Image (spheres, rainbow, N blue to C red):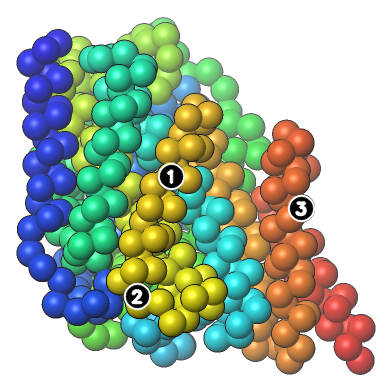
């Protein structure tokens, strides 16, 4: 146990150290020309995280192939991004992502940026919780939380110093780790497992509830609106590089998550029993492949840390560019990013103290982001009066947050919120006449 902890901490320190290598050539943290490989590695790793490794294997184990809804939705969303890149000019690095999605309108930019802040706070906090859970088996809950917070502090540090360049450098290393320590062993393990006859004691239980299925499908809409995507598109060498990077990134993600779902599904079909479905991934690696528990932990660590730095970078960019430039335009970008980094760190740690479920945080965040930003982005060409766009977005954001605080769900969410938002835009447009 002590050796595995040392190995795990060494891997975490190595990932962080690599983030501090190199210097940013410009004060603009996004002004870094990215190749298609760096875009693909960055997108695939930022999307994977703790939920796509542990949770999707667990869904495959307990619920079967319905888990493929997520990777299919992400791939289709990637095609949507390529279509948008073809139809619309790539936003300038001088323009924040929320400003781009809002068409440059100041009020709508503020609403979208506020929504992005809430959403990516939840997403980043979920990864802090996942980081803590990696270390709990080794050091207990309280010390694991301190370890997770300490690692997060160093991550925020290299984001501040290195910008998108630092984030994508670590993405590449973590991508290699995931391929070598997860993809290849998992594929080999599945081949050897399925060489025998299936067990008559399948552990497959039931289908997912409809709300979870709808939330998993939300990536189809989330990916074309994702800050992760547009920040990297803005930093691409050229249009072709951006398209190639996005296409490769979503396909890599789709393959890795499909492998995780298949691992869980076939484990259930061949009678492998675990008390908790989300523990099937580490159990499979130790029982079927004879690998040390630290191998699985390093894979999950790489995925979680990659997602955490991407989401944190999105947050810091949103606060410093879209919000900070409006609140304090005379303050330098460097100082705004320092303040944003400290605010993001404190907010995520605060939420992580009270949060427990990684998947529920991620799915809730996706619902808020898509329901608030999606309709206005799609319909902005057909609406002239800006209040017709930003007011429904604000109402939708407040409604979702209020329902979440009350612990209430509505039938058909998240798509109910999306259609209600679009209906409200239509109603206000009709009133314009």
At 37% from the left and 84% from the top, the residue drawn is: 94
Who is closer to the viewer here, 324 or 312? Answer: 324
Image quarter in which the N terminus is found: top left
Who is closer to the viewer here, 240 or 63? Answer: 240
**Closer to the eye: label 2 or 3:** 2
At 55% from the left and 67% from the top, the residue drawn is: 113
**Closer to the eye: label 1 or 3:** 1
* Mark 1 residue crowding within 10 angstroms, few (<14) / some (14–19) / many (20+): some
Q: Quadrant of residue 68?
A: top left
- The alpha-carbon separation of the residues under discs 1 and 3 comes to 25 Å
Who is closer to the viewer here, 178 or 138? Answer: 138
Image height of 296 relative to 276, above or below:
below
Looking at the picture, how far across and down is residue 219, in whole percent?
A: 50, 55
Q: Which residue is mark 3?
A: 399
Looking at the picture, how far across and down is residue 279, in whole percent?
A: 35, 19
- The alpha-carbon separation of the residues under discs 2 and 3 comes to 33 Å
Q: Which residue is mark 2?
A: 333
Q: Earlier in the sequence, mark 2 or mark 3?
A: 2
Residue 186 circle label: none
Q: Secondary structure at mark 1?
A: helix
Most extreme residue toward the front, as rendered?
A: 330
Residue 346 circle label: 1
Q: Secondary structure at mark 3?
A: helix
Image height of 378 relative to 205, above or below:
below
Q: Secondary structure at mark 2?
A: helix
Kindly tell me whether residue 265 is visible in this rendering. no
Q: Earlier in the sequence, mark 1 or mark 3?
A: 1
Q: Earlier in the sequence, mark 1 or mark 2?
A: 2
Image height of 248 relative to 416, above or below:
below
Image quarter in which the C terminus is found: bottom right
Q: Going by the image, does 391 lie left or right of 287?
A: right
The answer to the question of whether label 1 and label 3 lie on touching residues, with beta carbons closer than 8 A, is no
């Amino acid at each position: 146990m002590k050796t595995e902890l040392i190995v795990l901490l060494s891997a975490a320190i190595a990932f962080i150290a690599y983030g501090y290598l190199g210097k940013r050539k410009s004060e603009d943290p996004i002004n870094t020309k990215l190749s298609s490989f760096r875009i693909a590695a960055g997108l695939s790793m930022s999307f994977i995280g703790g939920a796509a490794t542990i949770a999707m294997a667990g869904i495959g184990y307990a619920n079967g192939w319905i888990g493929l809804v997520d990777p299919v939705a992400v791939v289709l969303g990637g095609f949507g991004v390529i279509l948008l890149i073809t139809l619309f000019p790539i936003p300038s690095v001088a323009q924040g992502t929320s400003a781009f999605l809002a068409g440059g309108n100041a009020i709508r930019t503020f609403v979208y940026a506020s929504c992005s802040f809430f959403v990516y706070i939840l997403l980043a906090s979920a990864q802090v919780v996942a980081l803590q859970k990696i270390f709990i088996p080794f050091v207990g809950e309280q010390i694991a939380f301190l370890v997770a917070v300490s690692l997060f502090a160093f991550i925020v540090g290299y984001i501040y110093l290195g910008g998108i360049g630092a984030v994508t450098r670590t993405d590449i290393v973590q991508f290699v780790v995931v391929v070598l320590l997860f993809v290849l062993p998992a594929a080999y393990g599945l081949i050897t497992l399925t060489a025998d006859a299936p067990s008559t004691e399948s552990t497959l239980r039931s289908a997912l509830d409809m709300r979870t299925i709808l939330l998993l499908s939300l990536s189809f809409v989330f990916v074309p609106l994702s800050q992760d995507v547009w920040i990297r598109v803005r930093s691409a060498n050229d249009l072709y590089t951006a398209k190639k990077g996005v296409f490769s990134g979503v396909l890599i993600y789709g393959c890795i998550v499909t492998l995780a779902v298949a691992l869980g599904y076939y484990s259930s079909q061949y009678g492998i029993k675990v008390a908790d479905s989300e523990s099937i991934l580490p159990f499979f690696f130790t029982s079927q492949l004879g690998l040390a528990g630290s191998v699985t932990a390093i894979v999950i660590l790489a995925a979680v840390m990659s997602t955490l730095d991407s989401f944190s970078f999105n947050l810091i960019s949103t606060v410093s560019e879209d919000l900070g430039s409006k609140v304090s335009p005379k303050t330098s970008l460097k100082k705004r990013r320092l303040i944003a980094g400290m605010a993001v760190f404190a907010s995520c740690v605060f939420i992580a103290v009270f949060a427990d479920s990684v998947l529920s945080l991620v799915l809730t965040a996706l619902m808020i982001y898509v329901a608030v930003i999606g309709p206005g982005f799609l319909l902005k060409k057909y609406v002239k009066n800006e209040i017709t766009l930003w007011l429904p977005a604000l109402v939708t954001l407040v409604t979702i947050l209020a329902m979440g605080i009350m612990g209430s769900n509505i039938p058909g969410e998240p798509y109910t919120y999306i259609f209600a938002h679009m209906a409200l835009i239509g109603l206000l447009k009709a009133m314009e006449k």
